[in-house]
Amino acid sequence: MAVKNQLSQNEQPKFSEAIQRKTYQKLILNTLGDSKRAERFITAITSAVSANAELQKCDAGTILSGALLGESLNLSPSPQLGHYYLVPFKDKKRDDGVKVAQFQIGYKGYLQLAIRSGYYKKINVLPIKVGELEYFDPLEERIKVHIIEDEEIRENTETIGYYAMFEYLNGFRKAIYWSKKKMENHANIYSKSFDLKQKRMLEKGEIPEKELWKYSSFWYKNFDTMACKTMLRQLISKWGIMSIELQEAYEKDMGVVHEDGNVQYIDSQILEQQQQNQKQQQIAEQQEQQVIMEYKDTNEKQQEMTDKEFFAGT
């Protein structure tokens, strides 16, 4: 979603001031098409930004672009709801040192969009705690767990893995389970904002207090939440039916939406998944072409045999 940037690089007012400018006000009204909805949007996003001191320092255009994307998906910017987040990131390509706001869908946002699509009878994702898992059968995709009933005790119990599943209205079902070790290795490889060794040091209290600000990534602050989101992304992107809204959310997740509407991916995880999807599509196309060629070859041989039998019979 494009935002006309009316601000010079040397002029970076607070977002609460920038959003009151006539150019932004007009843009919001034209985009949303309803004055009451525009008012609610301005109030909600201003409140969300004011609660985050680092986000207030970000380029106003990227904040507004990300927020309008969230609004177009009918998701709330409220951090308490966890539908999506605008996360401050340093853009090395900028000379002015101003940070940009990265659009990040929360796992609850993915659940909202999936449920809203109307394709899913059931969809769920859950951290599995110590003592709960009896087994997970990857062939039959069956799991047996003994969930800790006391929610407070369960919340404070160590996580050992993650389970995600969905069932379509037509009965098709898919489920996956990842150990916590697998999830940590995945994040360590594909997320620039996470380092497994640093996480271990953080857990042991070996990071000096003056350096704790460096570990503001959700992978450090709330690993289970990011893990649940990763499980849903893996599950839905590979086996799920994706509505237009869900496709847009998936494609622009973890991206910085710029003034011209282009999306810049700072975190390498989304790039890796896009490359993976392209590779899978190329393999599928090659396999399809091979099947077609084999089918044609078989048909030609069968026709040749039929012709020989026909002429032999005459």
Image: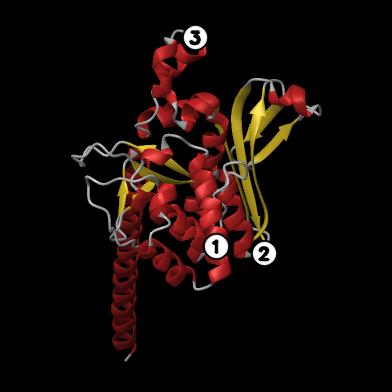
Residue pointed to by mark 3: 205
Query: What x and y, as percent, mark residue 44?
Result: 56, 52
Q: Is residue 1 visible?
A: no
At mark 1, the secondary structure is: helix
Query: What x and y, as percent, mark residue 186?
Result: 43, 31
Query: What x and y, as percent, mark residue 120?
Result: 64, 59
User: Could you tell me which quadrant the C terminus lies in?
Assistant: bottom left
Label 2, label 3: how far apart the Cα atoms are? 50 Å
Q: Amino acid at mark 1?
A: Glu
- Please determine whether, in this image, residue 270 is positioned above or below residue 261: above
Along the line of sight, the residue nearer the viewer: 40 or 298: 40
Residue 167 position by quadrant: bottom right
Residue pointed to by mark 2: 170
Identify the residue at image location x=54%, y=26%. Answer: 180
Task: Tell me if 188 is positioned left or right of 51 in this view.
Answer: left
Q: Amino acid at mark 3?
A: Gly
Determine crowd level at label 1: few under 14, some 14-19, many 20+ residues with C-alpha closer than 10 A.
few
Which of the labelled discs sits on residue 39, or is there none? Answer: 1
Residue 215 position by quadrant: top left
- Please determine whether, in this image, residue 90 is positioned above or below residue 61: above
Identify the residue at image location x=73%, y=25%. Answer: 154
Along the line of sight, the residue nearer the viewer: 16 or 258: 16
Determine crowd level at label 3: few under 14, some 14-19, many 20+ residues with C-alpha closer than 10 A.
few
At mark 3, the secondary structure is: loop
Q: Earlier in the sequence, mark 3 or mark 1?
A: 1
Q: Amino acid at mark 2?
A: Asn
Do the numbered discs 1 and 2 sit on residues whose CB atoms are within 8 Å?
A: no
